[in-house]
């Protein structure tokens, strides 16, 4: 490397495959993205849809196609990425660029940049908030308030900011129609429709979430802090929504001459405490090696913090006499914090009354840092007031011992807290090992399902557009699906859901997967195929364990779908033109219950306009944001609306999954699987054979 030249930083960027190569090169090397593009080495990964990008891989940016639809908007929840940028010819971020690497900008937990013409037609606020929930940045309980505030601010920035539309006053029907026509004209223009609008979210160290909406309009005069008059934005009515926004947020601030509005929310997620207070400068979590682990109580590291040397020596002599020899000392509160940072003690014996920082302050600082949340603190004091003793416990002390110290009491309390610490460490180590093994099992289970490039290629061979989404629950589950090519015209498809959760359900999916692919009888009728699988599975499964399953065959030459069901959720068969759909019969005996169970093959037409939807019970048995399950009629309506709202071929399962995720809890109680097969007009493929 030449002297003085900085090494290049490698960044992986997910890019929509439909973008032209010159456009990709233009944006990934642009100063709109990076502060110093010459120091960036970009690795580009392309995909037809968001399904094509593995969610295990992390991306620095996702470059979305121009005039994106709901499918690419769904990438906010599907991709392991924090920055999403729509490429469009007029993209010019001006004072908002660069989006990464600019030291004056905070690091964003989520950033979305869209053109006005795309953002106007999409449910951006809802998808943005859904993504925040799934990233753990906000809890489900405050999500509705956040979405309402973001939607109001976003709409104002879009309509009154970038489009510069005046919606003030009473609108007659004629003026309303004129306003609609003017909106379409401005959306089509480069001046208005080609402006960018950017949403960002970042979590502060204190847990607060700051969401900013940035537009490229002419701006307006930000209001005074306590002003009640409406805000003037070039004769518009932006201020009408401000009281609502303020009622939903903790604070509302304006920057960039009113072209950026910042909304601050108090988060409700638990277990997400950041390093704050006196330990905020640590910058990294503490880790322990095998040599550092606390193996016995007597080799524990004990910090003695007392401003009196004689007191420190007395405590040390008591401890050494009982075999505790790994002792560290601090002469005041500041010194105590420094020693904690340097030695990560297993126990702190802390005097309450000390110079610089007293024991109360040290306790607060220790408990403010997650790395020391479990470190036991024995406070020692000569205070007789009940109030002082109560306060030290409120500030985080584990135990309290009175001066003058009693040797036997000190040793007893020290021993029990150290032994508890040792037990907790062993439990944590066991939990970490178990979690690592569960993660491995999760990866193995996910690999049982076809990868996007696989099911897309197989689908194309049969003139089908196949889409799928699989999301594992917070526990290991038992969902699985797959495709079985039979011959040039027939394609088999199956979906499985084992009862229960945990390692047992996951192991059962591995058993069944092995059976499915060890049998060379996929061309049997669906009823016979399930009967054979059931006999094998009954022999392998413990009593009380079972699976629901559907196995079907799409025959493109005959235009039929034949299937057999073992108590599977009712499939949906619909028309890809009208969106009209109906439920098919999913009844049958679950696999693994009765050895000689019989199944029925059912046939339905599947022509050039048909689609088929298969799904696990999580879709219809998850409590949504309205407090109810998704009803059968609602599912049919979702299918119909999704098909009719899309002008071209769509990834039906992915879009339904995105709508489900918008309304479902961030953590699901059951595995979620949804698969769609749609007839697609792929030249040359339907005339094979």
Image (tube, helix red, strand yellow):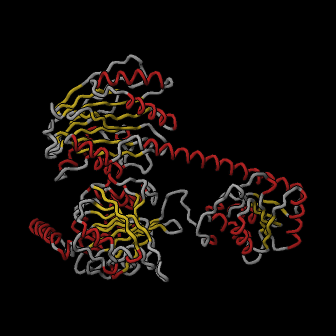
Q: Does 67 sit above or below residue 675?
A: below
Q: Does 2 sit above or below residue 176?
A: below
Q: Residue furthest top?
A: 596
**Residue 174 sits in quarter:** bottom left
> Which residue corresponds to the image point at 67% horizontal and 65% vertical from the top-left?
366
> Which residue corresponds to the image point at 41% horizontal and 49% vertical from the top-left?
665
Work out which quarter of the rendered image holds the C terminus and state it: top left
Locate residue 641, reporting x and y percent: 21, 48
Locate residue 646, reporting x and y percent: 19, 52
Camera-side residue of 147 and 65: 65
Q: Is residue 259 left or right of residue 18?
A: right
Q: Is residue 685 left or right of residue 630?
A: left
Locate residue 478, reporting x and y percent: 44, 36
Camera-side residue of 91 and 303: 91
Camera-side residue of 79 and 395: 79
> Which residue corresponds to the image point at 87% horizontal and 56% vertical from the top-left?
323
> Which residue corresponds to the image point at 26% horizontal and 70% vertical from the top-left?
158
Number of numbered labels in the structure image: 0
Residue 391 visible here: no
Q: Residue furthest left?
A: 174
**Residue 414 sits in quarter:** bottom right
Locate residue 612, reporting x and y percent: 24, 38
Residue 152 visible here: yes
Q: Does 138 sit above or below residue 179?
A: above
Camera-side residue of 330 and 486: 486
**Residue 552 sits in quarter:** top left
């Amino acid at each position: 490397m030449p002297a003085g030249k900085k090494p290049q930083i490698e960044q992986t960027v997910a890019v929509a495959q439909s973008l032209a190569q010159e456009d990709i090169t233009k944006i990934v090397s642009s100063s709109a993205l990076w502060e110093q593009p010459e120091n960036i080495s970009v690795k580009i990964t392309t995909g037809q849809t968001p399904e094509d990008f593995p969610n295990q891989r992390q991306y620095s940016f996702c470059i979305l196609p121009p005039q994106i639809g709901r499918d690419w908007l769904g990438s906010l929840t599907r991709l392991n990425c924090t920055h999403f940028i729509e490429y469009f010819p007029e993209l010019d971020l001006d004072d908002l660029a660069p989006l990464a690497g600019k030291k004056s900008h905070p690091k964003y937990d989520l950033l979305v940049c869209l053109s006005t013409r795309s953002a106007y037609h999409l449910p951006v606020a809802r998808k943005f908030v859904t993504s925040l929930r799934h990233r753990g940045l906000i809890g489900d309980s405050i999500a509705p308030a956040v979405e309402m505030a973001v939607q109001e601010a976003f709409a104002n920035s879009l309509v009154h900011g970038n489009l510069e539309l005046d919606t003030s006053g009473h609108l007659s029907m004629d003026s309303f129609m004129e306003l609609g026509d003017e909106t379409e004209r401005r959306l089509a223009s480069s001046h208005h429709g080609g402006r960018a609008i950017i949403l960002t979210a970042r979590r502060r160290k204190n847990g607060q979430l700051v969401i900013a909406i940035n537009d490229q309009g002419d701006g307006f005069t930000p209001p005074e802090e306590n002003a009640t008059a409406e805000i003037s934005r070039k004769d518009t009515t932006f201020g009408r929504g401000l009281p609502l926004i303020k009622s939903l947020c903790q604070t509302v601030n304006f920057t960039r001459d009113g072209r950026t509005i910042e909304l601050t929310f108090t988060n409700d997620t638990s277990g997400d405490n950041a390093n704050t207070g006196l330990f905020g400068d640590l910058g990294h979590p503490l880790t322990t090696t095998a040599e550092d682990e606390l193996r016995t109580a007597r080799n524990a590291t004990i910090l003695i913090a007392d401003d009196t040397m004689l007191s420190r020596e007395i405590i040390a002599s008591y401890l050494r006499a009982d075999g505790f020899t790994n002792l560290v000392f601090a002469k005041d509160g500041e010194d105590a914090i420094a020693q904690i940072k340097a030695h990560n003690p297993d126990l702190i014996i802390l005097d309450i009354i000390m110079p610089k920082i007293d024991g109360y302050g040290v306790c607060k600082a220790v408990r403010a840092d997650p790395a020391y949340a479990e470190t036991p603190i024995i406070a020692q004091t000569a205070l007789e007031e009940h109030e002082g003793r109560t306060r030290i416990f409120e500030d985080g002390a584990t135990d309290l011992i009175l001066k003058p110290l009693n040797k036997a009491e000190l040793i007893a309390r020290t021993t029990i807290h150290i032994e508890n610490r040792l037990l907790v460490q062993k439990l944590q180590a066991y939990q970490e090992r178990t979690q690592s093994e569960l993660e491995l099992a999760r990866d193995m289970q996910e690999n049982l399902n076809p990868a996007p490039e696989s099911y897309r290629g197989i689908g194309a061979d049969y003139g089908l557009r196949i889409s799928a989404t699989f999301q594992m629950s917070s526990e290991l589950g038992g969902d699985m699906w797959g495709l079985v090519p039979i011959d040039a015209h027939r394609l088999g498809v199956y979906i499985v859901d084992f009862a229960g959760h945990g390692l047992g359900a996951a192991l059962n999916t591995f058993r069944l997967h092995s059976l499915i692919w060890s049998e060379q009888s996929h061309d049997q009728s669906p009823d016979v195929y399930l009967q054979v699988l059931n006999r094998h599975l009954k022999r392998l499964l413990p009593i009380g364990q079972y699976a629901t399953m559907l196995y079907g065959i799409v025959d493109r030459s005959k235009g039929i779908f034949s299937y057999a069901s073992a108590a599977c959720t009712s499939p949906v068969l619909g028309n890809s033109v009208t969106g009209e759909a109906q439920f098919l019969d999913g009844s049958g005996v679950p696999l693994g219950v009765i050895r000689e169970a019989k199944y029925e093959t059912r046939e339905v037409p599947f022509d050039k306009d048909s689609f088929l939807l298969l799904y696990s019970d999580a879709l219809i048995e998850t409590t949504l944001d309205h407090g109810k399950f998704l009803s059968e009629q609602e599912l049919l309506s979702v299918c119909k609306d999704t098909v009719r709202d899309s002008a071209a071929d769509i990834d039906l399962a992915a879009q339904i999954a995105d709508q489900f995720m918008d309304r479902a809890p961030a953590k699901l109680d059951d595995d979620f699987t949804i698969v769609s097969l749609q007839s697609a007009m792929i030249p040359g493929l339907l005339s094979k054979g």
